[in-house]
């Protein structure tokens, strides 16, 4: 019988190749690489970022494992600029949830961007002074917490927030007078620490002089720029190697100039958000590293 090519109806089949296991393996490898990349993009130790939001404070503390805490909201939200700065930073840093928001005061300069944060992303807990509802801006924050079912706690001396990886936040309060309380936020990793004092008054300076000094490697200098906020006594009490200042480029008042001149003359490594942009301080096992877009002064 002559040989003829196989027709379509003939029972000749191509060898089967099961690609399922190979595809699954490649997907697992890709997922693992992405997970490693995301993990490495988050800091080892504790990282504090002072955002450039003018003469007000907005500081983001985060650690490896995607835990993040926001301290204050960047001042009065003029035209939504504070909110945009906060939310843009969260997006660029891969922050999709805040474990806590810590408010050191209830005025506009303390809570400016917080309403947008509460509307746009989940927050585990808001810690605020007992007088949060005493100001219009504070009442808005309280109402939004209720609307979003975000728990509100009252700041208390000695509270500790464990961030994991050896990093923690310790809260301290000083009674300044009958109506006001000063708040200190200390971020620690191992032997390295940063003291954040966003709201210090003349009476607060006197209270600090009469209490155990909050020694730290890094001091977040109060942003008011008033004559009584002269940081000389704070520097003597805290003894920092690095000072971070939230400041707008338009801050030309003599009080501010005096504060900055005193800081620069102290020999401390001074970083300012108006000239250095967003400032990142990393604390890890007793070491401190600072990053920013520093310009000549």
Image: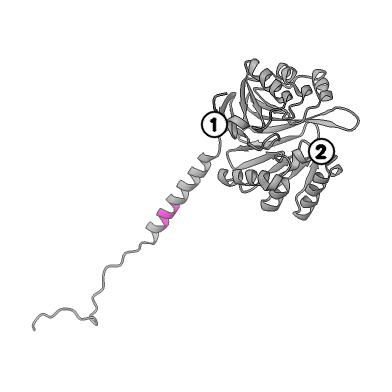
12 left or right, relative to 186: left
> Mark 2 = which residue?
129
User: Measured along the vertical axis of the image, is residue 138 above or below residue 280?
Assistant: below
Number of residues whose C-alpha sits closer than 10 Å to that of mark 1, classed few (under 14), some (14–19) or many (20 or more): few
Q: Secondary structure at mark 2?
A: loop
* Label located before the other in sequence (1 or 2): 2
Residue 9: quadrant of the picture: bottom left
Residue 117 spot, x, y in % from top left: 69, 48
**Magenta residues, start to end:** 24-28
Q: Is residue 194 magenta?
A: no
Q: Residue at x 62, y 38 (%)?
A: 62
Along the viewing direction, whichever of 85 and 194 lies nearer the viewer: 85
Q: Residue furthest right?
A: 178
Residue 15 spot, x, y in % from top left: 27, 68
Along the viewing direction, whichever of 292 and 130 lies nearer the viewer: 292
Mark number displayed over residue 293:
1
Residue 291 spot, x, y in % from top left: 55, 30
Front label number (1 vs 2): 1
């Amino acid at each position: 019988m002559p040989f003829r090519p196989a027709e379509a109806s003939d029972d000749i089949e191509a060898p089967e190749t099961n690609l399922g296991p190979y595809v699954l393996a490649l997907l697992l490898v890709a997922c693992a690489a992405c997970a490693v990349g995301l993990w490495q993009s988050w800091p080892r130790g504790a990282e504090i970022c002072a955002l450039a939001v003018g003469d007000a404070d907005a500081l983001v503390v985060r650690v490896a494992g995607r835990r993040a805490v926001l301290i204050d909201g960047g001042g009065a939200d003029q035209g939504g600029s504070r909110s945009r700065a906060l939310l843009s930073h969260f997006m660029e840093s891969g922050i999709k949830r805040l474990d806590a928001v810590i408010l050191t005061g209830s005025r506009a300069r303390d809570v400016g961007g917080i309403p947008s944060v509460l509307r746009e992303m989940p927050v585990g807990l808001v810690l605020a002074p007992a007088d949060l509802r005493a100001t219009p801006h504070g009442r808005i924050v309280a109402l939004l917490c209720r609307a979003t079912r975000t728990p509100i706690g009252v700041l208390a001396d000695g509270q500790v927030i464990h961030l994991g990886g050896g990093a923690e936040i310790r809260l301290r309060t000083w009674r300044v007078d009958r109506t006001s309380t000063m708040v200190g936020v200390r971020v620690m990793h191992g032997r390295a620490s940063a003291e954040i004092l966003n709201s210090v008054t003349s009476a607060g300076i006197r209270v600090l002089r009469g209490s155990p000094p909050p020694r730290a490697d890094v001091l977040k200098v109060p942003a008011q720029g008033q004559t009584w906020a002269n940081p000389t006594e704070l520097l003597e009490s805290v003894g920092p190697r690095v000072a971070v200042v939230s400041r707008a480029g338009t801050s030309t008042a003599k009080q501010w100039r005096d504060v900055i001149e005193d800081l620069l003359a102290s020999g401390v490594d001074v970083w300012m958000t108006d000239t250095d942009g967003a400032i990142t301080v990393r604390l890890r096992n007793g070491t401190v590293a600072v990053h920013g877009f520093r310009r000549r002064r």
